[in-house]
Amino acid sequence: MAHERPPPVPDGGRVAVLAPSAPVPTARLDRVADRLRAVFGVEAVLYPTARRDPDDGPAPPAERAEELMRAFADPAVDAVLSATGGDDQLRVLDHLDPERLRRNPTRFFGYSDNDNFRLFLWRLGQVSWGLTAHPDLAVDPEIRPYVRDHVSRALFGELGTVSPAAEWTDEWFDFESGEPRSWRDSPGWWWRDHGPVAGPVWGGTLSILRWQLCADRYLPAPERLDGAVLAVETAETLPPAREVGYVLRSLGERGWLGRFDGLLVGRPRAHNPVSPRERSFDDYRTSIRDHAETQLARYAPETTAVFDVDFGHTSPVFPLPLGATARLEPGAGSITFE
């Protein structure tokens, strides 16, 4: 089944900002609203869950689900943007009415914990995009050109062909000082070349895939993954590289890994100031690749893979579209979302 692309946002459209995962300080979302208006020419509407005090934690799961469905059904809303990620959205899915969402296709932007909802939309046949208000649109003195260009494409049309960013960072932005972050040269992408492939993208943040597999309630029929492209990234928790291999191994034992024709692995974050797990970026990304390649050799030897791709929990990123067809061209070194 082909996935439906919800209608693009019109010029001067309205973007609902919700917190289907966790809330963030309203001042940061007001900053995002200003940028949406000034940079993209769209109006942000902050819904009640987004204005919730972060100290109070997320709204109850049923309330978050109802707000999502209400925003999708609102004819005045052209897109829905998640405030940020978290660790609780899996409990929201049980309260969603698939038919209400299916009747009202709307462009949804979110990732990390929001990959729970995005995989739910995938099963309904709807494309969604990987971006959150915070941090992606809130950090840095101004929105980076790479982010601005790709977000504009995702809002108003199609993502098309993407290329590696010239610079990247995994530093946290200091909102109090507003000082620019340090950036380093991009390592580019690393290809495991088994020829060009094309298929719908399925996957997301590693921990969310693990939760989805454990819950085993919202997964697609396995045959729908035949010829698809699996996407995986490791998030800010900096899990050991072997965990990537463990999840791929489990997918292999489930009989799923060999169904994918392609694999996209996001550029890993290696720094988190509140985590004891500090990594050497070069060692970390190489180890992730090695563990992934071990499992691919066992279960999916003909799968084309691309590593260190610009999506996930580093900066800058493009909004990875789950459900869209990804065309991987190793010879040209290009990825195109069609």
Image (spheres, grey):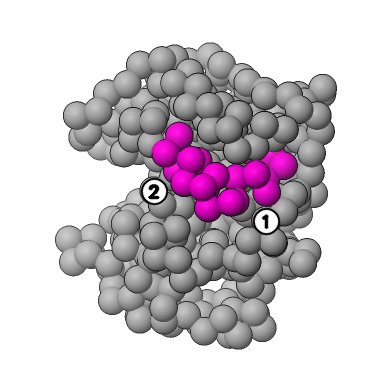
Q: Is residue 307 above or below residue 221?
A: above
Q: Residue 207: give its label.
A: 2
Q: Which residue is drawn at 45% across and 34% down?
A: 245
Please identify the quadrant where the N terminus is shown.
bottom right
Distance from the alpha carbon under mark 2 to that under mark 1: 20 Å
The part of the image, by quadrant, that contains residue 335 is top right
Q: How crowded is mark 2: few (under 14 residues within 10 Å), some or many (20 or more)?
A: many
Mark 2, mark 1: which one is toward the viewer?
1
Q: Main secondary structure of the magenta part?
A: helix
Q: Can residue 139 be seen in this view?
A: no
Which residue sits at x=76%, y=27%?
194
Instruction: Give x and y (percent) for residue 305.
Output: 65, 31
Q: Which residue is drawn at 73% across and 64% down?
A: 3
Name the N-terminal-most of marks 2 and 1: 2
Q: Residue at x 35, y 51 (%)?
A: 28
Residue 299, position as x, y percentages in the image: 60, 38
Query: Which residues are the magenta region?
Result: 245-263
Residue 270's image quarter? top left
Q: Would residue 336 appear left or right of 258 to someone viewing this image? A: right
Which residue is denoted by mark 1 in the rendering? 225
Disc 1 element? helix
